[in-house]
Image (cartoon, rainbow, N blue to C red):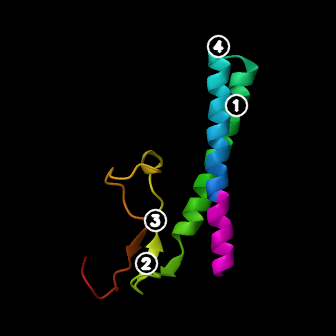
């Protein structure tokens, strides 16, 4: 996959995250407006968020299949998605976005 295609996928993942957050804000606004969890606005916002997060997960799994060359150290790495709780939370012990690829002849 060309670098430009990878960057497009990564930008799509970020955009989907933002849109899922916006759908969550709609659901929160519905709760603040005293709508219950079965109201159509609430259900549609939750369904939209779910669909966006499913597509985001599909794109992240595709990106994880990529083998990249690290710009900093020159090592071959795989892209690794961060868990959602770690996004934007420095110092949480979240895994890095990339990990070295072990040669098949080297034991783990």
- Any part of residue 6 in sight: yes
Quarter of the N terminus within the rendering = bottom right
In depth, the one of 3 and 104 nearer the eye is 3
Residue 9 lies within the magenta run: yes
The label shown at residue 45 is: 1
Task: Please say if 31 is above or below 101.
Answer: above
The residue carrying mark 2 is: 77
The label shown at residue 80 is: 3
Query: In this picture, which residue range is highlighted in magenta?
Result: 1-12
In depth, the one of 108 and 69 nearer the eye is 69
Task: Please say if 48 is above or below 63.
Answer: above
Q: Position of residue 88 (x, y in %)?
A: 46, 50
How far apart, in angstroms, are the residues tagged by discs 1 and 4? 13 Å
Quarter of the C terminus within the rendering = bottom left
- Badge 1 crowding class, 10 Å Cα cut-off, few under 14, some 14 to 19, many 20 or more, is some
Task: Please say if 68 is above or below 9.
Answer: below
Residue at screen point 66% across, 50% down: 16
The residue carrying mark 4 is: 36
Say whether disc 2 or disc 4 marks the residue closer to the N-terminus: 4
How far apart, in angstroms, are the residues tagged by discs 4 and 3? 38 Å
Q: Of helix, strand and loop, which one carries label 4? A: loop
Q: Of helix, strand and loop, which one carries label 2? A: strand
């Amino acid at each position: 996959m060309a670098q430009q295609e990878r960057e497009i996928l990564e930008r799509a993942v970020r955009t989907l995250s933002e849109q899922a957050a916006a759908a969550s804000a709609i659901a929160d606004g519905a709760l603040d407006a005293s709508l219950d969890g079965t109201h159509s606005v609430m259900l549609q916002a939750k369904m939209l968020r779910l669909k966006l997060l499913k597509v985001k997960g599909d794109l992240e799994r595709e990106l994880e299949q990529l083998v990249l060359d690290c710009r900093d150290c020159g090592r071959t790495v795989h892209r690794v998605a961060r868990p959602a709780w770690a996004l934007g939370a420095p110092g949480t012990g979240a895994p890095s976005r990339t990990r070295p690829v072990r040669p098949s002849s080297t034991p783990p």
